[in-house]
Image (cartoon, helix red, strand yellow):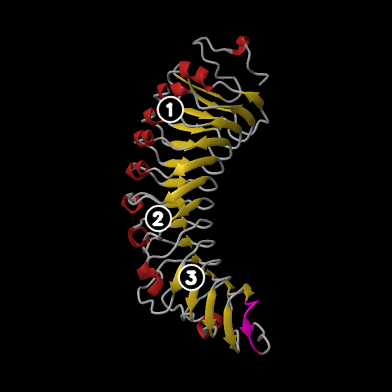
C-alpha cells in the first residue's frame, strides 16, 4: 500500500493510481485488495462514505472485524467478497437492503448465528457463498425466493433441520452445495426431479429416505443434473427397478449410506463416468455391464465395503481407470484389465 499517499490523488479527487483502487468519473468505484497478506482489524463502515462503490473485495488476507449494522447503506454495491479472512459475528438484518448486490462471498471466516430472513431482499443476487463458517439454525426458506440465484453454497456450516422446499422453482440455479452440515429429513424427490441445477452436493448430512424411496430409491432425477453427491447420509432403499433414464448424469456418489438389494446394470445412465457406491449394504453379483464398458463408459467405479458375492466377469472396459471392489465377499481371482 505504499502507493496510498495524498500526493498521488488525481485532480478530481480520486486516487486512481493507488494500488487496488478503481475510479470512475472522479468517484471510487472499486476497492480490490485480494491476496496481499494484510493483517488488520477492519471497520467496513468507512466504505459507506464511498457513495458510488460497486465492488469491494479483500479476499484471502488475515483481516478481522464484522459486518456493520449499516451495511444496507452500501446501496450501489454489486460485488462484495471478504472470503478467507478472520471476520466474525452474525449477519445483521440490514444485509437484505443490498438490492443491487449480485455477488456475495463470506466463505472461510468465523461468522456464526442464523441467516436473517431479510436476506430475501437480495433481489439481484446471482452468487451467494457462505461456506466454511459456523452459521447455524435452519436454512431460511427466504432463499428460495431469490429468483436471480445461479450459485448457492452453504457447505461446511452447522445448519440443522430440513432443507426448505422450493429450490426447484429457481429456474436459473445451476449449483446447490449444502454438504457438511447437520440437515435432516427425507431427501426431496421433487427437487431432484424438477431442479434446473447441474451440480448438486447434499453429502455429509443426516438425510433419510421417504417410505416411497425405501421401496425404490431415486425414482427420477432432472435431466439437467450432471453431478449428484448424496454420500455420507442415512439413505436407504434399492436401486433395482429403475426405469427412467438419467440422460446427462456424469457423477453419482451414493457411498456411505444404507442402500440395499442387488445392483442394477446401470443401463439407464448413458453418460455416467464416476460411480461411487462404497460402504452400503448391496448384495448379489457385480453386474457385467459395469466392467465391460458397454453401454456405461466408467472411468471410476467404487463398490468397496458392501456384501457383494460371486465371481467377477472379465474386465474389458477401455475407459476404467479407478476400480475398488475390496471388502466384499467376491470369489476367485480378479481378472486383469484388458
Instruction: Identify the image quadrant of residue 223.
Output: bottom left
In the image, 270 versus 142, the foreground residue is 142
Q: Secondary structure at mark 3?
A: loop
Q: Secondary structure at mark 1?
A: loop
**Residue 330 painted magenta:** yes
Looking at the image, residue 314 sits to the left or right of residue 215; the answer is right
Q: Does the residue at mark 2 contact the one at mark 3 (Cβ under 8 Å)?
A: no
Q: Position of residue 36 (x, y in %)?
A: 66, 30
Q: Earlier in the sequence, mark 2 or mark 3?
A: 2
At x 56%, y 43%, the residue is 132
Q: Secondary structure at mark 2?
A: loop
Magenta-drawn segment: 325-331
Residue 272's disc number:
3
The residue that disc 1 covers is: 77
- Distance, label 1 to label 3, CA atoms, is 41 Å
Residue 141, can we see it?
yes
Looking at the image, residue 309 sits to the left or right of residue 28; the answer is right
Residue 216, can we see it?
no
Looking at the image, residue 278 sits to the left or right of residue 206; the answer is right
Q: Position of residue 212 (x, y in %)?
A: 35, 70
In the displayed structure, would residue 244 be above or below residue 162? below
Q: Does the residue at mark 1 contact the one at mark 3 (Cβ under 8 Å)?
A: no
Dominant secondary-structure state across the stretch colored magenta: loop
The residue that disc 2 covers is: 197
Instruction: Identify the image quadrant of residue 21.
Output: top right
Q: Earlier in the sequence, mark 1 or mark 2?
A: 1
Q: Quadrant of the C terminus?
A: bottom right
- Distance, label 1 to label 2, CA atoms, is 27 Å
Amino acid at each position: 500500500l505504499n502507493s496510498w499517499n495524498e500526493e498521488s490523488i488525481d485532480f478530481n479527487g480520486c486516487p486512481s493510481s493507488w494500488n487496488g483502487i478503481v475510479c470512475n468519473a472522479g468517484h471510487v468505484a472499486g476497492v480490490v485488495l485480494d491476496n496481499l497478506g494484510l493483517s488488520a482489524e477492519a471497520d467496513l463502515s468507512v466504505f459507506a462514505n464511498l457513495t458510488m462503490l460497486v465492488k469491494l473485495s479483500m479476499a484471502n488476507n488475515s483481516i478481522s472485524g464484522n459486518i456493520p449494522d449499516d451495511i444496507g447503506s452500501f446501496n450501489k454495491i454489486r460485488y462484495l467478497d471478504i472470503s478467507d479472512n478472520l471476520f466474525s459475528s452474525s449477519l445483521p438484518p440490514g444485509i437484505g437492503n443490498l438490492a443491487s448486490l449480485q455477488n456475495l462471498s463470506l466463505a472461510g471466516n468465523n461468522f456464526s448465528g442464523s441467516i436473517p430472513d431479510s436476506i430475501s431482499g437480495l433481489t439481484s443476487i446471482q452468487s451467494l457463498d457462505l461456506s466454511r463458517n459456523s452459521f447455524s439454525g435452519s436454512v431460511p426458506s427466504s432463499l428460495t425466493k431469490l429468483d436471480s440465484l445461479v450459485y448457492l453454497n452453504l457447505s461446511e456450516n452447522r445448519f440443522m433441520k430440513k432443507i426448505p422446499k422450493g429450490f426447484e422453482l429457481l429456474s436459473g440455479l445451476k449449483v446447490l452445495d449444502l454438504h457438511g452440515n447437520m440437515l435432516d429429513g427425507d431427501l426431496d424427490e421433487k427437487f431432484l426431479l424438477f431442479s434446473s441445477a447441474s451440480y448438486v452436493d447434499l453429502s455429509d448430512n443426516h438425510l433419510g429416505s421417504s417410505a416411497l424411496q425405501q421401496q425404490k430409491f431415486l425414482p427420477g432425477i432432472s435431466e439437467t443434473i450432471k453431478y449428484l453427491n448424496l454420500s455420507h447420509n442415512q439413505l436407504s432403499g434399492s436401486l433395482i427397478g429403475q426405469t427412467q433414464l438419467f440422460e446427462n448424469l456424469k457423477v453419482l456418489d451414493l457411498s456411505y449410506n444404507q442402500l440395499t438389494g442387488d445392483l442394477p446394470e446401470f443401463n439407464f445412465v448413458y453418460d455416467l463416468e464416476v460411480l461411487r457406491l462404497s460402504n452400503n449394504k448391496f448384495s448379489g453379483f457385480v453386474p457385467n455391464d459395469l466392467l465391460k464398458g458397454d453401454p456405461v463408459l466408467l472411468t471410476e467405479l467404487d463398490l468397496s465395503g458392501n456384501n457383494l458375492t460371486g465371481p467377477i466377469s472379465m474386465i474389458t472396459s477401455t475407459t476404467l481407470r479407478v476400480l475398488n471392489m475390496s471388502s466384499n465377499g467376491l470369489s476367485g481371482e480378479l481378472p486383469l484389465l484388458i
